[in-house]
Amino acid sequence: MDVYVESGPKKVFACAVDWPGWCRSAKTPDAALEALAAYGERYRAALGSGRGFAPPAGASALTVVERLKGGSGTDFGIPSAEAEADRRAVDDDELTRLSGILSAAWKTFDATAAMAAGHELETGPRGGGRDLSKIVEHVFEAEVAYARQLGVPTRDAEAPGLKPDARMAAVRTLELDLLAVRARGGDPPENPRRRSPYWSPRYFVRRSAWHALDHAWEIEDRVD
């Protein structure tokens, strides 16, 4: 199973090339690979049945095919380097697969947040950690930022005037629609103020799926 390793000065991510969202961090490359393998069963549960994912028996079953230099984002806890594999073209079959994985990650986060409603979330030894409402708000705000990086116009990505659940659903719909356009070679809506390149379709799916699952698993681990 192919993975890439993104190393910053203080933190390292190991991420599966073909399974967006399955990405874990540690202080060293070997520890990151061990963490990734350990989360295989949780990732399979998040995907649901019928997607063909088989968790590895251990880190020895993972093959590092690319090593990336991370930076401040990596050390902050974000897999923020785009792998060479993320620049590959996306045909219609792969678009269906990637969209399905992304939707499954979103669904897992929503279900986990709903499960935790009314429960206290454990905090760290110094009282750190967002409460549930703050986690949900953070995930929405991040999704708006990701939508812009894909090319969704800012005004559309903000989805104003809707209730929280409806806002999240609206942003996700815009993302999936534009993801299909981008995957088929289309351009995002023109934005004359844009100076930096947009994310590739594969990297967008990777970041959004990782963020949803990372916080879903955080909630699961912190439910009292």
Image (cartoon, rainbow, N blue to C red):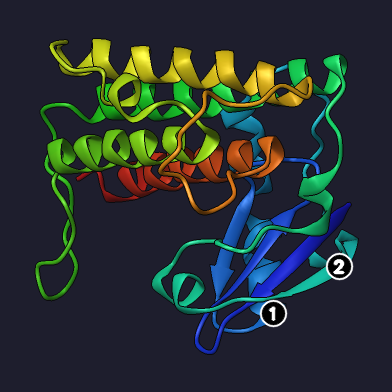
| Residue at x 38% of width, y 35% of height | 143
- Residue holding disc 2: 64
Residue 2 seen from this side:
yes
Asked whether, in this view, residue 139 is left or right of residue 123, the answer is right
At x 16% / y 74%, what residue is drawn? 125
Residue matched to label 1: 29
Q: Is residue 130 left or right of residue 81?
A: left
Image-quadrant location for residue 7: bottom right
Asked if one can make out residue 48 in the rendered structure from this viewpoint, the answer is no
Real-space Cα separation, disc 1 to disc 2, in angstroms: 10 Å
Q: Front-most of 27 and 185?
A: 185
Picture quadrant where residue 135 is located: top left
Q: Is residue 41 above or below residue 130?
A: above
Does 58 sit left or right of 120 as displayed?
right
Viewer-proximal residue among 13 and 123? 13
Split into 4 quadrants, where in the image is the C terminus? Answer: top left
Residue 144, image x, y percentages:
34, 34
Please tell me which of labels 1 and 2 falls first in the chain.
1
Residue at point 85% right, 61% down? 62
- Could you tell me residue 217's position as x and y percent? 42, 44
Residue 46 against residue 2 in the figure, above or below: above
| The residue positioned farthest toward the bottom in the image shown | 9
In the image, is 46 to the left or to the right of 220? right
Cβ atoms under marks 1 and 2 closer than 8 Å: yes
Q: Residue at x 75, y 15 (%)?
A: 96
Amino acid under disc 2: Val
Could you tell me residue 205's position as x and y percent?
A: 61, 36
x and y percentages locating residue 103 in the rendered image: 55, 20
